[in-house]
Every structure is written in C-alpha cells, then in structure tokens.
Image (spheres, rainbow, N blue to C red):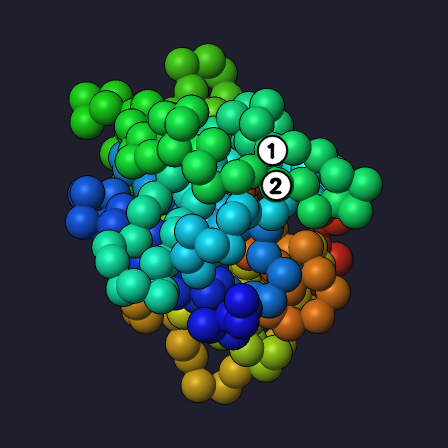
C-alpha cells in the first residue's frame, strides 16, 4: 500500500499535534528544531522540564512505530506515539510511554528498527496516558518559582545555585557569586558577560546556549543589553562546534548548569575599569 504522506510530513504533523494536545491539557510546551533531534518537545511546569520524543505513523495499516533502542541514553525521555489516521482523517490517537515502557515493550531487531505494534500498544493500555507526564512534573505548591533566580540561596556559608532553567538576560555565572551582571552584545553577535566573559548564543524564543569559550570583551560600539530584549529562552549547553551550537539538548536542572559553567576555563581578559 502506497504512503499517503511523505516521511517528513508525518513527523512534523505528529509533533505539532502532540504539542497542541499537550497545550490543550494545560502543559507549557516548547518545540525544538533540527533534523536529527533526540528531543522533539519540552514540557515545563514550575521550572521542571520533561523531554518528549514524538513518533508518528500515518494509519493503522502502517502497523508499528520504530525506535532504535541502542541509541536511547536519556532515561528521563517520555515518548508520545501518534497515529495520524491520515487515510480516514479520524481523530489522531496518542500513546504515552516512559523510557522503561519503551525498553520493555519495543521488540528488538537486528536492523535496529526496533518496533511496537499499534494494536499491542492499545492492548497494553498506553493510549491517552497523559498522567505519565503529569507524574513527572511538580505540584503547584512545590516551592519552585520559575523566572526568579534569587529565590534560593544557601543555608550554608556559600551561595548554592538556584539558577533558573529559563534565561532572564543576566549572567548565570555571576549569579553563582551572588551578583547580577549584565550581558552585552559583542562583535560575534553573542551576549557576553561584562564581568566574566561568559557568552550566550540566543536562539530567540527557544534556547539560550551557554558557549564553552569566553569572549574577548570586543563589544559592539552601539550598546545592546540582553535584559532589554525579549528573553525566557531555555538555558542550554554548547554541544556542537558550529552554529547554532546545539542540537536541541537542554539542561535538565540547575546543577547541570552550574557544573557546565564551572568546567569552563577562566577568563583571560581583565574587565574594563572606569
């Protein structure tokens, strides 16, 4: 039987439908971009993120979803499997599986096209199990307030990081020292900390990628500060050597952000003094 949709259309339709369904159910959803993504959607609530991978089939006759089990590394992944029903245009169906569900129920093959049969997924009761995502997110009274970096300081002698996963336009490295330091646009179109040289590449509305090399304080002659622009992007590590310096990966918690920043070489250029 010939395919109704091109593979790329199946993929993007499945991702957008899954995002819409999550949004309809009250989740905050961000789509990631790229051709070889490990994460398709990010669901957020009260500062906690759940990464989502979406897999789509066109219709029941498509038989099954495929995943390469050998490439699965992130145990926090949740999978949304979509049947588009493109042939009948009936309502799409959604099946929600945790990482453990996938490992336990996808049948391995020698070709690494490990699969789960559509009818088996229905029989196993994965359909519309959206609570699998809700269970991974904090309650409203969990005490974590998104967008307020200053909320958590150490109860010990030093400051403990409570770096928000969403960038507020200021230098996250300086926050570790208890300071609010502005980030200014430099000649490479990165925002650079005026104190530490930490650089952030902004994918507007999506990600704020913390680069693994520092700036040289070669700022633009026309001053532009990060907090003056729209922000709230997800803080992300640099994972590739070329723009946009990231393949969709994001920090999972504030401890990962702190560890990444502390791994960077110190700034070799002294800050300007008045």
- Name which residue lies at 52% across and 39% down: 117
Decide if residue 110 is in sight here.
Answer: yes
Looking at the picture, tell me which residue is in the foreground, 185 or 164. 164
Q: Measure the alpha-carbon separation of dots 1 and 2.
A: 5 Å
- Name which residue lies at 47% across and 54% down: 61
Decide: is 127 above or below 225.
above
Give the SS element for disc 2.
strand
Residue 212 falls in image quadrant: bottom right
Q: Position of residue 6 (x, y in %)?
A: 52, 74
Decide: is 240 above or below 139.
below
For residue 116, side relative to residue 45 (left or right): right
Q: Where is residue 173 in the image (x, y as percent from the top left)?
A: 53, 45
Name the residue carrying label 2: 115
Decide: is 34 above or below 173.
below
For residue 106, side relative to residue 274 (left or right): right
- At label 2, counting other C-alpha atoms closer than 10 Å, the crowd grade (few under 14, some 14-19, many 20 or more) is some
Contact check, label 1 and label 2, Cβ < 8 Å: yes
Q: Position of residue 266 (x, y in %)?
A: 72, 48
- At label 1, counting other C-alpha atoms closer than 10 Å, the crowd grade (few under 14, some 14-19, many 20 or more) is many
Q: Position of residue 175 (x, y in %)?
A: 45, 41
* Dot placed on the residue nearer the N-terminal end, 1 or 2: 1
- Name which residue lies at 74% across and 57% down: 268
- In the displayed orientation, state which residue is furthest to the right: 110
Q: Which mark is residue 74?
A: none
Residue 17 falls in image quadrant: bottom left
Name the residue carrying label 1: 106
Decide if residue 19 is in sight here.
Answer: no
Looking at the picture, tell me which residue is in the foreground, 90 or 165. 90
């Amino acid at each position: 039987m010939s395919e109704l949709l091109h593979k790329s259309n199946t993929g993007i339709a499945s991702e957008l439908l899954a995002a819409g369904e999550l949004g309809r159910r009250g989740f905050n959803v961000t789509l990631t971009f790229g051709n070889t993504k490990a994460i398709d959607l990010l669901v957020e609530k009260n500062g906690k993120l759940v990464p989502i991978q979406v897999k789509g089939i066109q219709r029941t006759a498509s038989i099954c979803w495929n995943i390469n089990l050998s490439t699965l590394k992130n145990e926090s992944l949740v999978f949304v499997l979509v049947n588009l029903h493109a042939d009948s245009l009936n309502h799409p169906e959604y099946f929600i599986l945790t990482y453990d569900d996938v490992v336990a129920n996808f049948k391995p093959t020698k070709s690494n096209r490990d699969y789960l049969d559509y009818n088996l997924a229905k029989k196993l009761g994965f359909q519309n199990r959206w609570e699998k995502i809700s269970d991974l997110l904090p309650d409203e009274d969990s005490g974590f307030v998104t967008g307020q970096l200053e909320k958590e300081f150490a109860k010990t002698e030093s400051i403990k990081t409570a770096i928000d996963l969403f960038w507020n336009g200021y230098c996250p490295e300086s926050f570790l020292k208890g300071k609010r330091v502005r980030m200014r646009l430099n000649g490479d179109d990165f925002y650079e900390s005026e104190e530490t040289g930490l650089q952030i590449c902004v994918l507007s509305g999506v990600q704020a990628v913390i680069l693994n090399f520092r700036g040289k304080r070669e700022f633009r002659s026309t001053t532009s500060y990060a907090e003056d622009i729209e922000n709230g992007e997800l803080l992300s590590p640099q994972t590739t050597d070329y723009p946009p310096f990231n393949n969709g990966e994001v920090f999972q918690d504030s401890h990962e952000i702190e560890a990444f920043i502390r791994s960077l070489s110190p700034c070799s250029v002294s800050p300007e003094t008045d």
